[in-house]
Amino acid sequence: MFKKILVANRGEIALRVIRTCQEMGIACVAVYSDADRKALHTLCADQAIYLGVSEPAKSYLDIEKIIATAKNADADAIHPGYGFLSENAGLARRCEQEGLVFIGPPSRVIQDLGDKTIARKIMRDGGVPIIPGMGCAESLLEILTDEAGRIGYPVLVKAAAGGGGKGMRVVHEENELADACRQAAGEAAAAFGNGEIYLEKYLKRSRHIEFQILADSLGNIVHLLERECSIQRRHQKVIEETPSTVVTPDLRTAMGQSAVDAARASGYVNAGTVEFLLDEDGKYYFLEVNTRLQVEHPITEMITGIDIVQQQIRIAAGEPLGFTQADVKGRGHAIECRIYGEDPENGFMPSPGKITYLQEPSGPGIRNDCGIYSGFDVPVEYDPILSKLIVWAADRNHAIARMKNALSKYVILGIKTPVAFLMDVLASEPFQEGKTYTDFITTHFEGWRQKTDEADLAVLAYIIDEIARPRSPQAHITGTTGPATPWQTIGNWRL
Amino acid sequence: MFKKILVANRGEIALRVIRTCQEMGIACVAVYSDADRKALHTLCADQAIYLGVSEPAKSYLDIEKIIATAKNADADAIHPGYGFLSENAGLARRCEQEGLVFIGPPSRVIQDLGDKTIARKIMRDGGVPIIPGMGCAESLLEILTDEAGRIGYPVLVKAAAGGGGKGMRVVHEENELADACRQAAGEAAAAFGNGEIYLEKYLKRSRHIEFQILADSLGNIVHLLERECSIQRRHQKVIEETPSTVVTPDLRTAMGQSAVDAARASGYVNAGTVEFLLDEDGKYYFLEVNTRLQVEHPITEMITGIDIVQQQIRIAAGEPLGFTQADVKGRGHAIECRIYGEDPENGFMPSPGKITYLQEPSGPGIRNDCGIYSGFDVPVEYDPILSKLIVWAADRNHAIARMKNALSKYVILGIKTPVAFLMDVLASEPFQEGKTYTDFITTHFEGWRQKTDEADLAVLAYIIDEIARPRSPQAHITGTTGPATPWQTIGNWRL
Amino acid sequence: MDYRLRIDNTDFPVEVEVNEDLQLNVMIGEKKYIVDYTVISDFCIHMAVDNGIRSGNINAFTAYGAYGKNVVINGRSYMVQDIDSLAQAVRKGRQPNLPNEITPPMPAVVVSIPVSIGDLVNKGQAVIVVSAMKMETTLCAPFDGTVVRINAGINDKVVPGQILVEIEKDG
Amino acid sequence: MDYRLRIDNTDFPVEVEVNEDLQLNVMIGEKKYIVDYTVISDFCIHMAVDNGIRSGNINAFTAYGAYGKNVVINGRSYMVQDIDSLAQAVRKGRQPNLPNEITPPMPAVVVSIPVSIGDLVNKGQAVIVVSAMKMETTLCAPFDGTVVRINAGINDKVVPGQILVEIEKDG
């Protein structure tokens, strides 16, 4: 087993990986940028090494810096988390060259599956159902128009190198096609340095169902059941749950087998996620493979009892899976709500800044994977995810009730969060009935505003706060956080 | 189902019950004494009603006040938690008379099982193995001496009305018997208002193994597997775990059946715990039935996925158990550490006082049932339990590693706690090997002192704190807690 | 004691007095509340609120922020402003984010500035792109005009209220 | 800068200086540490400690208490005392819990007082019983003597350092 792992990430996911390393008795090295000098992952790792300025390209995305830091720190392996370099075949390749273990699939697999059109070909050849559409990227509008006609409108323009909803456009009629292709290609070029696009059939009222897979280096592959991630905003997941309300045991077996087939067809090793779209007729189609730990992996951990990060590390160390498909059993129901720093009343606009006060919910069946604390300044440079609130309960209704209660106890002062929005989604009839399609938020919660029936209580609290406290707003703004840095402080002391 | 439940308790267990009520959509009423005006249960319930002065007899132990408060608040039912009135047949009887539902067994069952000698008779008649010993209480020394001779030394002098280790003495030789009986009777009279004693065989190197049972009012009874609670100080449990390292599947089936037999023999309804001693030969003996929710119930919840408080409420409302013995399956391993306010370097002496700062551990598989917060003043009048740290993991080794890591992240400033002691117990060879007998602490940890190998770090922290902070100790002592009460504050403002 | 408070766009006239039991009697508009409270910490106030129907226990969390007092109750977050001090702030010219000015909607980093000083721009034309938490936002010209000043450079951190590009109206 | 600190019964002579990289050079006895630190909150300090073998990241939690500064690191709790200010406190007579005085070992409530003023008591005889968190502790006469004062009543809350019963030594 590894002696030391470098965690090439930040925030809640870096902490998640650090925790498992510490429990396994493996030393862990955090890396940090200027913006993250006081970040929790910097504080909680066994060792923290400075990478560079806050700009991602000069710190968390700088492959050579990460490699050099790992070698200097005598790390055996690198865990990339999600985002940043986690799906970068270049980092995996450099690790392979430098004798470091990349905790993820081989670089070739990342590269193949990172190109959507190559991935579609691998899956088709492996017998995995794919969405009707083109086999390779195309730039000629004439050919794209022909293909769109053949596929049938509505079609989806997608970036071959895509991800995170960028370079994606729905086209309902032929006369919209040219513009959509141009915009998508431009966006893709800007986001991924690759403007290649292709067309797929657009599936209306579909659900996003994904299967967690684990594959060891000896060829053993299992899936850890499904996750339904249909509740999305800007093509990013907001609420995930498992099991899905619509996946029957038979469908679970079939989709699970397809997920395992997908892993086998691509030569997959380590943890990954096979994403499918499920249409209203119960037909499912391969969407993509995420070749990394998924943000929503905790809900699978909650129902299966399997620590996915620990499995990733064991697999990367060459150990065989210690269990078979028959050993994987789901128990109860788990839901995750992503707590972003954003304003749901204002187009989910980012809301970075200082967390004046934080109080996390707790109790039976509640897990909060959290990367912030009272006094932490949420940087403007990185992903807006603050924490992931996860609940487990014996059944879906109890899980929903538990999540609503937990959200109502979550206190984050200083920046905007979607806590109240999430409470309303969970309480809504379509959610409670399991009518969770990918257009859920636009259909049911477009232009959402927070209810005002308890605003009087906020007025009372304002007044009591005025009456009960000394009238020095400054004292409140600084809160419990000492603004001192070692330099300032030592400076003063030397005078 | 009930509309409103009064929780006749305080601290972490009141919060535990309140959480489940809130998740079930049942309103909950907290009661509080003077010392608990700012206690978490007072703050977090839907409604909080003042009971009286801090002295337990005039607040939490005052049956008529509790009954009157429940009726005034329009509560349907009373949950007694553990301790206080939870095993008081009088409260259960008064509830029955007043048309309130007591969430626990019928008063007659509490009364029968509360008398150790009657309980022994019920169990013997019900085919449950009991420890060799006397069938009824006795006060004549002559008869006690004869009985001790018949049982064979060492014998245990026990209070008939006993509990919590009070009125209990181990006697190794006949000449110690008279003194031990006198002391035990005196202690029992003082503690329970009943000085009756009897003798049992004393089992050396035994383990404390208990089975959680659930019995509905329709006669369905299941057990929820065992808990091993051998690590004790002053006959009070400190660490509990499930499964036990020595309970084989066959033994589990046999003991579980005995537990169900015990419940049936006593006419049990609701949740309860059947305690056994297990000797080195694998023979087990009935010890007692705890006719209430047990402090350590969370470890059973962690491995079975069953919310015991929710089951208590459902059973009390007359619902049938929704599952059978075959549905009860344990998964993984759970450990609980009780965090008392006490000083393990000084005979586990109580340590009440102000919590200057609290930071709770969190992460996958970690649950902290906690009754304190930064700034809370732990009262001198009540039980020293501050919180229960519970971990779950796939196997015992991982659970131990997780617990050690969680303990090392637990920060409680202001009062003494056994966190460092617990870390050492978990790291010890006898614990890791599962050699957990009821004499564990006296055998391996008598006169424990905290290791000093990291004391230099404390010195460094002291110095940095001096250098980096303004030199006003007062600011540190008050911490983040506003000392204002509404009366003081309004008073000032009126001037 | 009187207050005039605002949450979102709703105004709340408030009258407060202390009653004989040392509780607060609060009138919010026409509604009357009787409130017992306890200060729990720097950020938490416990209130027992009686408004005829007993509504019981409330934990309120409060902190001052840039635009008012942030109050969180039962998972909902409110920005409560004192209308009187707001008015004062406006008189002092502190009101941020006037509609016709090019200022970021959140703290952000400047990604690109596709215009130069002296450029003629049309209403709706992109003049500066900022990024926060990996989301890019394009700020556009509010009217036809000429770029007269650019107050930020690429990679600068900018905040709401800061005017990034100044445009002189045509005509 | 020099300190003389005490933890438990061990003394730690300390010398501190700031090096050219603005880190602290700390000598504790013969051992040398180089420390970078960051103040995280009122109660938390982050230290990167280098003592030759890189020992890395430490989060230390500190708060003043009645008997010194409480420091928690890696689950262990230390009471760190400044010997110089301790000595001062003793001169001012603030040192609590002298062996020959009858004072509770923890904050407690008085349960019973089985002696009266004027009683002759023997060394080891129970003179007052206190209770904390449901555990009773009996305080006994430290020597043979006469009870001359009783400073507490039943149900009184008492704290360490408070003399509950005064006994005049025989002879």
Image: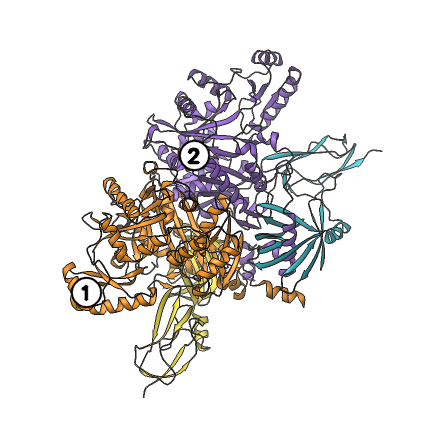
Chain colours: A purple, B orange, C cyan, D yellow
Return the residue at label 2: A300
The C terminus of chain C is located in which quarter? top right
Which residue is the extreme one toward the front?
Answer: B97
Determine the residue located farthest toward the right in the rendered image: C171
Measure how far apart labels 1 and 2 are at the Cα level: 60 Å
How many numbered tags mark residues here?
2
Residue under the point 57% across and 43% down = A379
**Which quarter of the figure is the N terminus of chain C placed in?**
bottom right
Whole-percent x, y for residue A139 in the image: 59, 16
Taking the spot 67% from the left edge, 68% from the top edge, the residue there is B495
Q: Is residue B220 visible?
A: yes
- Residue A200 at x, y percent in the picture: 55, 18
B280 vs D35, left or right, is left
Q: Is residue B304 left or right of residue A285?
A: left
Q: Is residue C146 above or below residue B390?
A: above
Q: Chain of mark 2?
A: A
Q: Quick one: label 1, few (<14), some, or many (20+) residues within 10 Å?
A: many
Q: Amino acid at mark 1?
A: Leu
Identify residue for label 1.
Answer: B144
Residue toward you, B458 or B80: B80
User: D154 or D146: which is nearer to us?
Assistant: D154
Q: Quadrant of residue B93?
A: bottom left
Q: Are marks 1 and 2 on the same chain?
A: no
Q: Position of residue B98 (x, y in %)?
A: 46, 55
Location of residue A219 with respect to A1 vertically, above or below: above
Where disc 1 sits, the SS reads helix
State the residue in front, B495 or A154: B495
User: Residue pushed farthest bottom?
Assistant: D171
**Residue B402: percent from the left, percent from the top?**
37, 46
Local SS, label 2: helix
Q: Amino acid at mark 2?
A: Thr
- The chain letter for the residue carrying disc 1 is B
